[in-house]
């Protein structure tokens, strides 16, 4: 939300001193279980085993999930059906998408005029979209906006989806057929997804969905996601913005600043040194509160990168290229093991099932 502080890590999970709520609960349960066995020697040894298992469930793994979350994800994956239906219903001026949820949107295509950065038109497009979401924040409920950049052998298309009742933005032309083509192929109105642990099989081939979860290591002046769009493979970018109602946004921003200040006070009292990351987070939260008080919109942002390929070998090569770009630009992503069909539906136009 600012060129000075920039975007940081995801604050979707509540953390205290870098520890998530369920991690604290697991550690406390492990300590209490082992402590009860120590205090009461006659209790069975299984209490110690349970305490050790609870403690081992708390550390995070490489994909950002703790062992407990990874276990739950695996159980959900093996218990649910592998097939998921995706349906599209076309009307005169709206598109209804059914994919683990239902959403009604209108689609608009950006008419490219050569290289946007040579004419300065990209700045005008960004300013128009910023004014649009600021206006949506004045409503009494949250609204969802998404932008999709789809790469094809013929070039790239940029799609904007807006909720019904939102005015047409300047420079965008309504094109609901593009929404349909982004969901299904060959003008069909229904398709099926076959979920695998690492990817989803669609009627157009294989798709692997990654989610950007941390922007804090990106160097100043770097254009986010630009290098991903220059990859030779079939890589699609989906940016989803949940526009929070302004009255609720004020409360959320105030609570975030108060919570961080309280955590910092407790940490200082316990003798912990204030880290540079903590200072930067406090600056970011304070700046966010000031911007929202000035009339800007509070957004929940999700960025998905979808890699498409006709075969599993080409898909692996494409994913490796994307991961190298993430490492080179400082972005950190989650790979979505066991959550591919859910993320695939989330990244669709309008974010059904969001």
Image (cartoon, grey):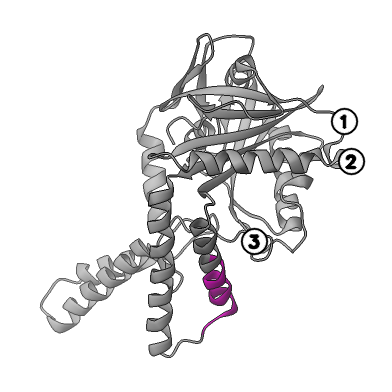
At 53% from the left edge and 8% from the top edge, which residue is drawn? 92
Screen quadrant of the N terminus: bottom right
At 53% from the left edge and 75% from the top edge, which residue is drawn? 278
What distance separates the C-alpha of mark 3 from that of mark 2?
A: 25 Å
Front-most of 70 and 184?
Answer: 184
Query: Where is residue 5 drawn, in percent x and y?
Result: 64, 65
User: First in sequence: mark 3 or mark 1?
Assistant: 3
The reply to whether the C-beta atoms of the residues labelled 3 and 1 are less than 8 Å apart is no
Screen quadrant of the C terminus: top left
Q: Nearer the viewer, mark 3 or mark 2?
A: 2
Range covered by the magenta-colored residues: 274-284
Relative vertical location of residue 8 with respect to residue 202 in this rendering, above or below = below
What distance separates the C-alpha of mark 3 from that of mark 1?
A: 29 Å
Confirm whether residue 349 shows in the render: no
Query: Where is residue 279 drawn, in percent x and y?
Result: 56, 77
For residue 6, the mark is: 3
Badge 2 marks a residue whose secondary structure is helix
For residue 114, the mark is: 1
Relative vertical location of residue 125 with respect to residue 58 in this rendering, above or below = above
Residue on which the image places disc 2:
118
Query: Where is residue 342 drawn, in percent x and y?
Result: 47, 35
The reply to whether the C-beta atoms of the residues labelled 2 and 1 are less than 8 Å apart is yes
| Res 209 → quadrant | top right
């Amino acid at each position: 939300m600012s060129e000075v502080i920039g975007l940081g890590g995801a604050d979707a999970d509540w953390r205290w001193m870098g520890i998530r709520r369920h991690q604290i609960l697991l550690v406390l349960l492990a300590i209490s279980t082992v402590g009860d066995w120590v205090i009461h020697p006659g209790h069975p040894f299984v209490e110690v085993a349970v305490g050790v298992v609870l403690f081992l469930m708390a550390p995070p793994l490489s994909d950002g999930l703790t062992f407990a979350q990874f276990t739950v994800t695996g159980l959900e994956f093996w218990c649910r059906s592998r097939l998921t239906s995706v349906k599209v219903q076309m009307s005169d001026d709206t598109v209804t998408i059914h994919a683990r949820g239902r959403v009604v949107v209108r689609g608009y295509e950006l008419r490219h005029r050569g290289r946007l950065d040579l004419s300065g038109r990209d700045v005008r497009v960004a300013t128009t979209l910023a004014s649009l979401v600021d206006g949506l924040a004045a409503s009494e409920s949250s609204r969802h906006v998404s932008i999709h950049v789809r790469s094809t052998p013929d070039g790239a298309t940029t799609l904007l989806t807006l909720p019904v009742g939102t005015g047409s933005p300047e420079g965008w032309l309504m094109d609901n057929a593009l929404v349909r083509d982004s969901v299904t192929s060959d003008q069909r109105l229904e398709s099926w997804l076959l979920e695998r642990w690492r990817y989803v099989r669609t009627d157009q081939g294989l798709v692997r969905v990654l989610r950007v979860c941390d922007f804090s290591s990106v160097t100043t002046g770097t254009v986010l996601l630009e290098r991903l769009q220059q990859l030779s493979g079939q890589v699609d970018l989906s940016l989803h913005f949940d526009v929070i109602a302004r009255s609720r946004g004020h409360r959320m921003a105030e609570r975030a600043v108060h919570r961080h200040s309280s955590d910092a006070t407790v940490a200082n009292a316990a003798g912990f040194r204030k880290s540079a990351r903590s200072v930067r987070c406090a600056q970011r939260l304070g700046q966010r509160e000031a911007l929202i008080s000035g009339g800007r919109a509070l957004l929940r942002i999700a960025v998905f990168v979808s890699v498409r390929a006709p075969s599993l070998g080409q898909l692996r090569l494409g994913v490796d290229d994307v991961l190298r770009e993430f490492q080179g630009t400082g972005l950190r992503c989650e790979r979505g093991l066991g959550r591919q069909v859910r993320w695939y539906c989330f990244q669709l136009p309008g974010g059904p099932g969001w």
